[in-house]
Amino acid sequence: RPSSAVRFAAASSSASSSSSSEEEEEKPENPYADPNYPDLEFVNYDDPGYVVDQGIVGDEFFPTDAEAKSAEERAGDGEGEGDVEAQIEEMREDRRRKNDEYQFETYHERVLKNGDEEYRGEWTLYRTSTFLPSEDGAGAGAAADENGLPRLVKARKTLRVVSSGRKIAVETDSDFRVDGERIVHEETVARSPSSEEEGTAPTTDEELFVAEILSNKYWPDRMSSGDFRGPQGIMCVGNAYTICDAVPLSADGDDEHEHEQHEGPFAEYRAEVGIQYKRMRMRVKLDYRAKEEDNEDEDEDDDGPSSVHPPLYLRSMAVCRETTERWPRHEEGRTDVDDATSARLFGPPGAPGGLYDPPPVVGDDDEQAGRYMMVDLEGGATLLFPHRMEQDPGAFGGNGWVTSLDWTPGRIRYQVDRKVMGGYGIKGLRSLELSEVQGQDASEYRPNDGGEDMRQ
């Protein structure tokens, strides 16, 4: 089971007095502690004994000692061991469902504002040279930069989009309340009443690209509480979240349930990661596709990817800068624009000093690091993401993939890391991690562990 983690400073409770100072164990020096703030306890993630208090150990929910003892007592002396295990598993499932409900309700409340508000945003669109024909006619993907990385081609115009989400009721025989609820999303382009584009079919290459972006779905059509389990790739932690959807390489003709398949390989893969702060939100949409030539039969002697597990290449990216109630970018003479947020969303590009806490991106082979790109975004943000993801279970020792977004919208600097499995499990989340630090103190408290996963 995936897990979420948050790194932050928390106020410690008053320590209880002991009968003898000799009985008190001497605590090891905490490298994160600040002598200027003796009343604050800084969590030391280097402590091998640290475990996040979520009831999660070894990617599984285990019952407490009291619950296990209660299950054994209810099983009776004459019952077999299998009955005890069944009751314990029932407790585990109950706790999973409660966590599903919490995630479902938190996403609806924090990300979708309880369905009561709309986000108005500007979307900056990019295409990669991987799927664009080169100027010399060498074919798609031939035009890369000097490092062999695909070029990001920015669209000439930005999109103005209104985004929202709400709950709907569905029929169910379950006694669990949220089983009768689903979340649906909606994103529509905002056009002026005098616009002649309304109802006209796209004709130019860029118009077709915009139409493709708007038709892409980054979430299940009807998101349920069970979609927050992890295999679907959806989770929220703190004020960050991620959603995901994918199309299997072989849907076996069952189009209705193709988005419910969580095991790869996939022909299309779309993920979104976002951070929200007060009325603002910055999110990034990443669209990956398998190349058609990689899906064709290949010779057995070919060392390249086979049709069994073709790699996924980044096709497009959308950077969405949004606010509630008003449009985000300052414009002279307009009253429906939030001037206070313009600088925070459209200011100088790049997070100060790059990513606050660079995640580990290398498996058994340094070649995996070459699958990543890092770009600085307007609004003081930095994004790290893979431009190519292997679906071969044996690639890079089975190491997974990570997407990181670093943004300082106010006093606090945030970095969210979306970490997924490798191979056929690429849709499933391994963890969603959020780092929070005072923006002015970020350089002083920057982690120096060389890029490690948070302890779960």
Image (tube, grey):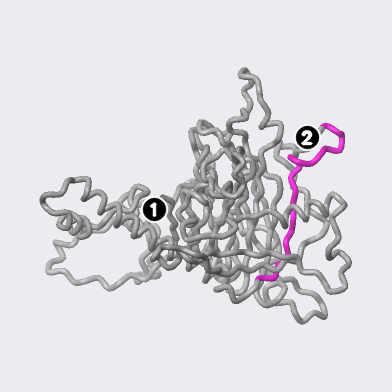
Residue farthest to the top, as pictured: 301
Q: State the residue at coordinates (64%, 21%).
A: 302
Say left or right for 254 vs 92. Answer: right
Between residue 198 and residue 444, name the one nearer to us.
Answer: 198
Task: Give the camera-side residue of 143 and 407.
Answer: 143
Disc 1 target residue: 456
Q: For the image shown, how many numbered marks are present on the structure?
A: 2
Image position of 19 (left or right of 421)? left
Would residue 369 be visible to someone looking at this image?
no
Q: Amino acid at mark 2?
A: Ala
Kindly report the distance in space between the C-alpha atoms of the residues bearing marks 2 and 1. Answer: 42 Å
- Labelled disc at residue 390: none
For residue 392, which quarter of the picture? top right
Residue that mark 2 sits on: 142
Residue 108: x %, y % from top left: 53, 68
> Residue at the left extreme?
77
Residue 455 drawn at (x, y percent)? 39, 52
- Callout 1: SS: loop
Q: In x, y percent, where is residue 214?
A: 72, 57
Label 1 amino acid?
Answer: Gln
User: Residue at the location (58% across, 33% down)?
Assistant: 309
* Boundaries of the magenta span: 119-138
Is 124 magenta? The answer is yes
Asked whether residue 180 appears in the rendered view, the answer is yes
Residue 234 located left or right of residue 67: right
**Label 2's element?**
loop
Mark 1, residues whose alpha carbon is within 10 Å: few (<14), some, or many (≥20)? many
